[in-house]
Image: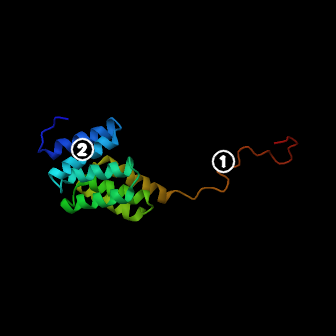
């Protein structure tokens, strides 16, 4: 593509479009790597690359590392906070994920992803244990019934 050669923001945003809208993860990866060659500590590109690794390449370890790199550049960067929290959440580290979502929400109280994922964690914690009979006895015959099941 004919993109301005020295603009990592445009390359990073184009990579996000390739990944999320066009479902072209390999092309998105190349574009993100170009952006990071231009500016190795570009936290939006690191964050987008992390999301790509987690969702398209199913590599949560790489995603975690890239989110951590982005947060080293800007510890208050909400997309990276929400992303690293999601990696923690999927790995089962709900307490740490919840605290990270709360940190993201202190930066942006209206960040929808952080709100929704924190709510999911809190709901899961508050939910009563599943009953032994998940359909609550439906389908059982009344006592004394002669009908075959």
- Characterize the local packing of mark 2: few (<14), some (14-19) or many (20 or more) Cα atoms within 10 angstroms: many
In the picture, residue 93 is in which quadrant? bottom left
Q: Nearer the viewer, mark 1 or mark 2?
A: 2
Is 129 placed above or below 8 here?
A: below
Q: Quadrant of the C terminus?
A: top right
- Residue 109 in view (yes/no): no
In front here: 110 or 85? 85
Cα distance in 3D space between marks 1 and 2: 49 Å
SS class of the residue under badge 2? helix
Q: Residue at x 26, y 52 (%)?
A: 47
Is 52 placed above or below 93 here?
A: above
Q: Which residue is mark 1?
A: 135
Q: Position of residue 30 (x, y in %)?
A: 26, 45
Q: Quadrant of the N terminus?
A: top left
Q: Residue at x 43, y 60 (%)?
A: 91
| N-term mark: 1 or 2 | 2
Label 1 close to label 2 by CB (< 8 Å): no
Q: Residue at x 43, y 56 (%)?
A: 90
Q: Position of residue 21 (x, y in %)?
A: 32, 36
29 left or right of 60 in image: left
Q: Position of residue 134 (x, y in %)?
A: 64, 51
Q: Which residue is mark 2?
A: 31
Q: Position of residue 121 (x, y in %)?
A: 43, 56
């Amino acid at each position: 593509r004919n993109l301005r050669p020295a603009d990592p923001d445009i390359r990073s945003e184009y990579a996000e479009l390739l990944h999320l809208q066009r479902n072209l993860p390999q092309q998105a990866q190349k574009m993100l790597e170009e952006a990071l060659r231009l500016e190795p500590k570009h936290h939006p590109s690191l964050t987008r690359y992390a999301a790509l690794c987690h969702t398209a390449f199913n590599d949560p370890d790489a995603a975690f590392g890239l989110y951590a790199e982005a947060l080293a550049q800007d510890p208050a960067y909400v997309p990276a906070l929400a992303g690293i929290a999601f990696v923690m959440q999927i790995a089962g580290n709900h307490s740490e994920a919840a605290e990270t979502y709360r940190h993201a929400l202190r930066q942006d109280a209206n960040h929808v992803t952080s709100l929704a994922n924190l709510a999911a964690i809190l709901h899961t914690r508050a939910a009563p244990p599943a009953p032994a009979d998940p359909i609550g006895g439906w389908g059982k015959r009344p006592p004394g019934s002669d009908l075959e099941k």
